[in-house]
Every structure is written in C-alpha cells, then in structure tokens.
Image (cartoon, grey):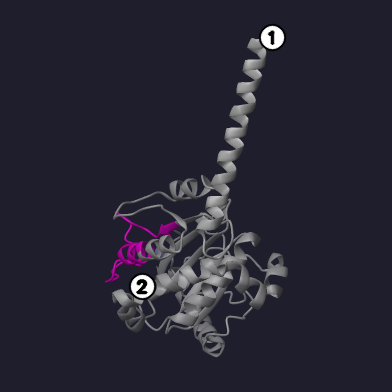
Amino acid sequence: MPTNFCRHGFAVASLLVTLLTSAMASAGRTAATTDGSSLITVVIDAGHGGHDRGGIPGQRIPEKEVTLDVAQRLRNVLAASGYRVVMTRDGDVFVPLATRVAIANSYRNAVFVCIHFNATKRMGAEGIETYFYSRDSLPLASAIHYYVVGGAPSANRGVRRRGYYVLRKTSIPAVLVECGFLTNPTEAAYAQTASYRQKLAEEIAAGVRGRNSVASAASTTRVATSESIPLQPYIDQTKVAKSSHHRSKHSHKKSARRKKSSSKPAGSEASSASTDREG
Ligand SMILES: [Zn+2]
C-alpha cells in the first residue's frame, strides 16, 4: 500500500507543518508584546468621521478630527511597543457602527479601544470618563482610565458601565474613553495642542499595557462586583438639561475630590453632562 502510505505520510507532514507554523506564530506573537502577554491586536476606533462630525450642533472643534489624531498617535505608540494595530478608520471617512464592530469581532486575542471627546451645552462641564459594558472589559477600562486621568489636567468623571452599541456588540474587551470636553474652553485648548494629544495617546497605551496589573492592584473589588453595577440607559442629555445641570455640579465636586485616586466604584455617578452620541 505504498500509495496509501504516501498519502498518510503527506497528511502527517502537512499537519506537522501546520502545527509548527501556528506554534511559531504564537511564539512570535507572545514575544512581540512588551508586557509579556499574548495580546497581539489592538483595534483602535476613532469616533465619528466623514459627515458625522461628532459633538453637538454648532460645536467649533470637530470631534472627528481630534479623535482621529489621537487614534493615529495611539497606533504609533502601540506599534512601537510591538502590538499589532488595526484602525477602524484612518482618514476622514464615515464608518457605520456595525462595520466598526465587525472589524473588532474579526480578531481573536484582541481588545477594542474607542477614542472620543465629550460635548455639552454647559461650558463648565469637564473631565475624563471611561465606559465599558461587559465584565471582561472592566480591567481594561479601569487601567485606561487610571492612566488617562493621571496624565490629564482634567477632572475624574469615573469609569462607567453603559450599553453603547460599540461596547455591547463587541465580543472582545471593549472600552470607550472620553478624553475631555471640546465644549469646555480649557479642555478644548488642550485638545488642540499636538503635545497633549500625544500625551493622551501615551496614557491610553499605558492602560493597554497595564490592563492586568492596574485591575488587580487597584480595582479587585470593582472587578468582583462588576455584575452589580447598574447599567445606565442611554439618555440624550440635551433633552434633560435642567436636571443634568444640577447633578453634574454635584458629581463635579465628587470628581475633584477623587482626582487621581481612580478608586471610585465604577458607574456610581448616574448622571452625565455628556451628549456623546455613541460611536
Ligand atoms: Zn463622540
């Protein structure tokens, strides 16, 4: 049965080659990251784009431009650290939310990071907030928030759980970071400087790298209780301006006290002056 033997031999050899190739590929992936993990892909999602300018009507600084710039800087920082990086958009184009999610979900062993800036009619609203949805996403959200708040001159608005489409529909750990209010004169001035956008990118990258250590060191309790975190329904804050104004003031006081501590229970601030429009 030489023919059969040959076939068998060929099949075994092919299998060995396949196994060897995939083993080498994983070894390469592991070695490629600087934090020793096997994470290979970071899918970066620059909010908005094309006809979707982001922010609120009449807003002077287009959110879509600063999100893209921070996303591109983040790509460069992460690529330099050995991560494989995928951008959901790399120019001023409109990408539907479903497409962004499909891109994210086409990778295994990956995380999804959405970059946004906040906006509201109330000029005084300020600060950094980070959103997650699934339990698996909380360590990454905590770490990114910890670093960005630590590196930004802005208030700490906390880590919050919310069912944004891009967070709900992604099957990999997914985080949306709001890097400050473009409607706040001080934060807008920061956002318009390249050095500050670079700083944001570096802090977000530090969060990606430290996603396991920050979660275990600073928010074990939060991880353990994440299922009890109430899900905040999406509310168009522009339509409830009166009540959100009052609550925002309250949460700002709390935020100031908590600045840099990053230890507040996730999602405990039920209100937001945010008018972010999901993606
Ligand atoms: Zn946005």
Sequence order check, earlier mark of 2 and 1? 1
> Which residue type does callout 1 highlight?
Met
| Residue in the picture at 52% in, 47% down | 107
Amino acid type, label 2: Gln
Q: Residue at x 29, y 74 (%)?
A: 194
Residue 153 shown left or right of residue 143 in the figure? left
Q: Is residue 103 above or below residue 177?
A: above
Graded by Cα atoms within 10 Å as few (under 14), some (14 to 19) or many (20 or more), the crowding at tag 1 reads few
Residue 38, relative to residue 70: is it above or below? above
Q: Quadrant of the C terminus?
A: bottom left
Position in image of residue 175 (x %, y %): 52, 63
Q: Quadrant of ligand 1?
A: bottom left
In this rendered view, identify the residue nearer to me: 180 or 113.
113
**Label 1, on which residue?**
1
How far apart are labels 2 and 1 at the CA level?
67 Å
SS type, badge 2: helix
Q: Nearer the viewer, residue 10 or 274?
A: 10
Residue extent of the magenta highlight = 44-72
**Which residue in the structure is indicated by mark 2?**
198
**Cβ–Cβ under 8 Å for marks 2 and 1:** no
| Residue 241 visible in the displayed image | yes
Say which of 185 and 156 sits in front. Answer: 156
